[in-house]
Image: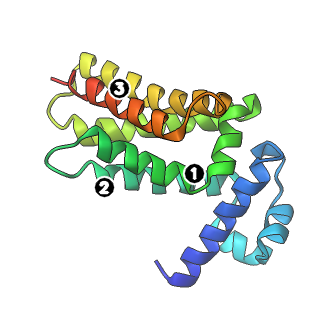
Amino acid sequence: MDERVRKTKQALTTTLFKLLATQPIDTITVTALCRTAHINRRTFYSHYEHVTDIFDDYQVILAEQVAASLTGAHLDARTLIATFDRILMTNFSGFKYLCLNQQQQRLVDQLQQMLFETLYDNLLARQKTPANQLVLTSLAAGVMQTYIYWFNHEAELTYACVTETSQKLIQAQLSLID
């Protein structure tokens, strides 16, 4: 990808997450997004049709990063958690807002579904049994719910505790895959 295109898309994504901290995605206009990102509307429309397309693009990037972390011969929970942390915490305030705001539940559900599909496609090459699908459904939901729980209980849980516990939970779930 051309460096200018990458920077433009990153600016739009960062701005979208900033705006999501104060309003639902359905109310964010292209004009407001472009003004805040200091990007021309014409530039926006050369890459996207709708504001929600930025979030779709973000999900594709997340899926690619998660898939890249799953390409090793042996997946371990530490690698997976480090990948999730790096990806999701890049836009910490926006992601936190998504997780805490009921109006954004649709976006959280989309992220969870993307995570499941990426895990499914990369971990279950020949083992696509209903039981393994259930394990991955639980894992994807668990990862999302872990962050949501932590955001709601930051005063009670350290980030290190969340990471350590998540690693143990993911390792236990991965061990259930046939």
x, y percent for residue 41: 79, 73
Say which mark, if any, is on residue 169: 3
| Amino acid type of the residue that numbered disc 1 sits on in the rendered structure | Asp
Q: Helix, strand, or loop for circle 1?
A: helix
Image quadrant occupied by the C terminus: top left
Q: What residue is rendered at 27% in x and 48% in y?
A: 70
In which quadrant of the rendered view does residue 35 lie?
bottom right
Q: Is residue 178 left or right of residue 140?
A: left
Give the answer, above or below, for where 149 lies relative to 14. above
| Res. 56 mark | 1
Q: Which callout, 1 or 3, points at the residue further toward the start of the chain?
A: 1
Q: Residue at x 71, y 41 (%)?
A: 97
Residue 45's place in the image compared with 95, above or below, is below
Between 112 and 144, the residue placed more toward the observer is 144
Query: CA gap, disc 2 to disc 1?
Result: 18 Å
Q: Is residue 134 above or below residue 78?
A: above
Q: Circle 2 — which element?
A: helix
